Amino acid sequence: MLLPDNNLPTLIGISSESDNAISRVFTGLSLEESLAELSPYFTTKIWFSEPVRIYRKKKEVHVFRSFFISRNGYLCYSNRNHPKTGRIFSEKNLITKLEFISENISCQFKSYKEFCKKFDTRFIIEKEIRKLWNSKSSQHSGQYNKHDFKRLGKKGKRVMERFLNNFIDVTTINKVYPYHKSNLYDNEEVWVYKEKQNSDSLRLGRDISISHQSNCPYVFYSSEYPGCLNGRYGLIANKNEYLWLEDD
């Protein structure tokens, strides 16, 4: 079992998934089982009664990114999330204190002002930023956090560079090429501008597109698997990042 002096009760309420893991630990799991059970949701800071060798250095305190139970039943640690290989943790008898650290807490925005700074209002109006602040992520059901902002890759940056050659902002619509009038709306005149780069392979890579249409106060981003309409979707936050909305 975990040492009785730990901070797990203070971490209840972060997400339903982590709450379920904490509940399972409180049913009486062993120390090894508890560390592995909590590992997907928290990093673990451990104090030892004497210096122990963690990787190449001896330490009395160390923050472990990940624990897991090996196929042979050993508790192992790794510096990667969701690992399959690692090093056996054999120092459990030297543990004097445990503290669990939630990345979800450290990645939360402290205020709307801080959240708003992530956006360039060329790509989205302030009213929509406020709506996003007051909404929940469809991926983790919590308020959007810093991890929901993803960097554009090399291909995405090339698409963005081309997009900015003709795009001014979401409130300025050019009714000339490369904008085109959509034929999907019968009672509304909608102009669309899209830049896209397809994958060079049907098996590898993604089709990347950045687009805007005149009836939307934001710019879309998509990264789709070649040959199908599945992938990752979001809104452009600034010229280097997009806000991840969903995967399908």
Image (tube, helix red, strand yellow):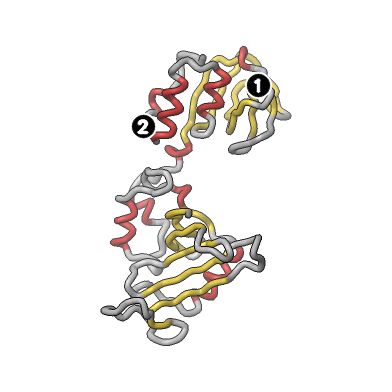
Task: Tell me the crowding category of disc 2: few under 14, some 14 to 19, or many 20 or more residues within 10 angstroms, Cα based.
Answer: few
Q: Residue at x 51, y 28 (%)?
A: 38
Occupied quadrant, residue 179:
bottom left
| Residue 80 x/y as whole percent | 62, 38
Please identify the residue farthest to the front as the structure is shown.
228
54 relative to 118 in the view: left or right: right
Q: CA distance from mark 1 to mark 2?
A: 31 Å
Q: Residue at x 38, y 49 (%)?
A: 137
Looking at the image, tell me whether mark 1 or mark 2 is earlier in sequence order: 2
Task: Tell me the crowding category of disc 1: few under 14, some 14 to 19, or many 20 or more residues within 10 angstroms, Cα based.
Answer: few
Q: Which mark is residue 166?
A: none
- Marks 1, 2: nearer the viewer: 1
Three-letter residue code for mark 1: Gly
| Residue 195 x/y as whole percent | 51, 74
Mark 2 — residue?
Answer: 13
Residue in the foreground of this view, choosing between 115 and 182? 182
127 relative to 121 in the view: left or right: left
Element assignment for label 2: loop
Element assignment for label 1: loop
Mark 1 — residue?
Answer: 73
Question: Can residue 156 be seen from the camera position used here?
Answer: no
In the rendered image, the vertical position of residue 157 relative to residue 93, given as above or below: below
Question: Can residue 52 be seen from the camera position used here?
Answer: yes
Three-letter residue code for mark 2: Gly
Q: Residue at x 36, y 46 (%)?
A: 143
Please identify the residue farthest to the right as the structure is shown.
56
